[in-house]
Image: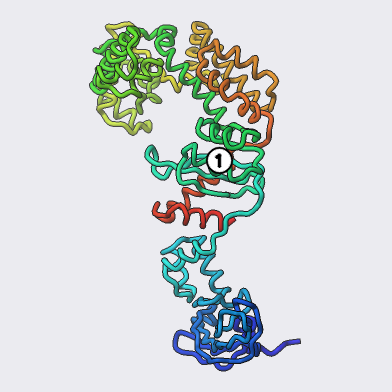
Amino acid sequence: MQQALRRSSLVPAGFVVESAYCNADSTVITVRHFQSFGLCPSCGSVSRRVHSRYRRRVRDLPLSGRMVELIVIARRFRSDAVLCGRQIFTERFPEGVVAPSSRRTSRLDGIVHHLGLALGGRPAAIFAKRLMLPVSNDTLLRVVRRRSRPPSDPLKVVGIDDWAWRRNHRYASIVCNLERRRIVSLLPDREAATAQAWLAAHPTIEIIARDRGGGYGEAAAKALPHAVQVADRWHLMENASRAFLDAVRKSMRQVRNVIGATRIEPELLTAAERIQYEGYLRRDETNAVILELAKSGMAIKQIARQTGHSRKLVRQVVRGERNDVFRTRQSSLDAHLPWLDEQWVSGCRNGAELWRRSTARGFRGSLRVVGEWATRRRRAEKADAENLQRIPSARTIARMMTIGRDTLSKAETVTVAAIEAGMPALVEAREIVAEFHMMIRRKAAAGLATWIERARASLVASFANGVTKDEAAVRAAITLPWSNGHTEGQITRLKLVRRQMYGRGNIDLLQARLVGTE
């Protein structure tokens, strides 16, 4: 059975409609509160003595494509309580209808709040205008800040990590509740003291998932010594793979000897490669000078002052992290080299003609690339064939040694076999890293102590030393289900929100938007 539409059903609960009329772009509704008494906001006493009346203009949800303005006939009451400090008070409306001194109804304020959470300031203001909810961008942000409420749930398992306000310049911290999978707080920096103060204010925390940086671990140990610290599994696996890559980089000279590409003929290099080779010689000379000073017992700080190089560069050279070899860059012509060799053997030795034929086969490079190849090939006929061998980069060698053999080409398989036969220490490092990955995947921490002893005597000793210093957190990462992966995901979401605001949001606004949408 159909029911008649009452005018009072169009306005918030508790109001009675007295009159309504429409303008060109708005609807004006005059309403009053249906109760005949008012409650004093100070003492709660009831009063029926009306002192005066006044009109409040309040915005409400749009109606039929028009903005709605409520003219509320509000009353002032005289207080009858003898001990109350108020003599006159303004009537209050029920909670969730119209807040004191508000110019919007609570239901409209809720829509404004959610628009601000989802879109921010200016985009939300533009969208609100299309919805017949005229509100400024500043008002939207004020509503978001005002209605933000920090989570009050007791914390047991949290994840903490850093994120960049501006990369390499300024960082902050994010804390997540891993049980509820929501952001708890944003800290203004990543200093250990700040994290320690926040953790100390939450003594109910039992498990802390963090990255392998020393700051958060130190803060957790001081603030909550009873809490279990869990290292991030993804970072553990990535650090292990990077340790093997560093081992390959430190062994590149031996790799070159094993592969058989020990000599470089500058006459066989192109003009661009010759410039690269000259730079390599300068770097090699710099490395030799720094190593000579380090062998004499000079400190890194003094070496940096004497040579004029940065401490970072000096430290890399002393630790063997800058000991690479010269190699020519990969070219767009590499995929066509077998076909070019066939054409060369068949008698076509004109660079322009080879370029025209290769272009017909899909080559997109310039004539100069093919011409330089032909010139080098012509000169190479008077040199040894080994001088033409291209040595792969350290990253490429690390990839070839760790992926399946069925995915390698014949030349790559021969290269890997030569490295494995001539460098057993590198093969051992690969096996140690693979064993560590397997421990994490299978959640088997029983052999961690044995693995550390073996790894400390290999090429990945630096990584093993780091695991030793953080052994308890690493063991917890292997055995416990908690990790910092969700925190990393929330950082990605945080960066998206910051980009929507063009990077201009303060930390309180970021926290209000991120926590408010949970």
- Return the residue nearer the eye: 315 or 459: 315
Tell me if mark 1 has few (under 14), some (14-19) or many (20+) residues whose alpha carbon lies within 10 angstroms of its own: many
Res 350 seen here: no
Q: Residue at x 52, y 26 (%)?
A: 239
Mark 1 = which residue? 160
Task: Give percent across and percent down for residue 218.
Answer: 54, 32
Residue 43 vs 405, above or below: the answer is below
Left or right of 498 on screen, residue 268: left
* Helix, strand or loop at mark 1: strand
State the quadrant of the N terminus. bottom right
Residue ranking furthest to the front: 83
Q: Which quadrant holds residue 280? A: top left
Residue 407 vs 159, above or below: the answer is above
Task: Give percent across and percent down for residue 110.
Answer: 56, 69
Residue 264 vs 60, above or below: the answer is above
Q: Residue at x 68, y 23 (%)?
A: 445
Left or right of 138 on screen, residue 232: right
Q: Residue at x 62, y 89 (%)?
A: 16
Q: Residue at x 57, y 55 (%)?
A: 150
Task: Give percent across and percent down for residue 135.
Answer: 44, 72
Task: Give percent across and percent down for residue 19.
Answer: 56, 93
Mark count: 1
Residue 38 vs 368, above or below: the answer is below
Residue ranking furthest to the bottom: 19
Badge 1 amino acid: Ile
State the quadrant of the C terminus. bottom right
